[in-house]
Image: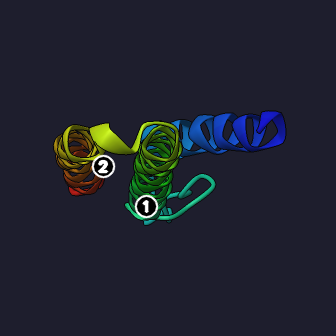
Amino acid sequence: MKKFSRVALALLAVGTVLMLTSPASAAEGDHAEAEAGFFPGTTAANLGGAIGAGLVVMGGAAGIGRIGGSAVESMARQPEAAGSISTAMIITSAMIEGATLFGVLGCFLASIK
């Protein structure tokens, strides 16, 4: 889990840097071509949005996976409470799914200029 956290943090940092990178402005003078920096045009913003969306989906999947695993384990320990546990699991999973969708849409909208 530590290795996954480090990779996710590194990808988050790379995505943030790429989203904030803007192309260099054109040099003044005779038809000088603009130096585009690391990525030309809006490629950096698009790549940053894609990396951010991927991280959001991975976080949502990890959260729903933990909820499901904990719910199954608690149902195995207390079978008589399975109905209320599954109801709480579905409601919480739906909330995480909504937050994940909101995060993905935010990443995509941030990459549009």
Between residues 8 and 65, which one lies in front from this camera angle? 65
How many C-alpha atoms fall within 10 Å of the one at disc 1: few (<14), some, or many (≥20)? Answer: some
Q: Which mark is residue 50?
A: 1
How many C-alpha atoms fall within 10 Å of the one at disc 2: few (<14), some, or many (≥20)? Answer: many
Q: State yes or no: discs 2 and 1 in contact (Cβ < 8 Å).
A: yes
Could you say where residue 14 lies in the image, as x and y percent from the top left? 63, 42
Q: Residue at x 28, y 53 (%)?
A: 104
Label 1 amino acid? Answer: Ala
Could you say where residue 52 lies in the image, as x and y percent from the top left? 44, 49
Between residues 80 and 84, which one lies in front from this camera angle? 80
How far apart in space, not on screen, are marks 2 and 1 (Cα)?
A: 7 Å
Number of callouts in the render?
2
Could you say where residue 12 lies in the image, as x and y percent from the top left? 57, 39
Q: Residue at x 50, y 53 (%)?
A: 58
- Identify the secondary structure beneath mark 2: helix
Q: Quadrant of the N terminus?
A: top right
Q: Earlier in the sequence, mark 2 or mark 1?
A: 1
Label 2 amino acid? Answer: Cys
Could you say where residue 83 lies in the image, as x and y percent from the top left? 21, 46
- Identify the secondary structure beneath mark 1: helix
Q: Which mark is residue 107?
A: 2
Q: Horizontal placement of 2 versus 105: left or right?
A: right
Quarter assignment of residue 50: bottom left
Between residues 65 and 31, which one lies in front from this camera angle? 65
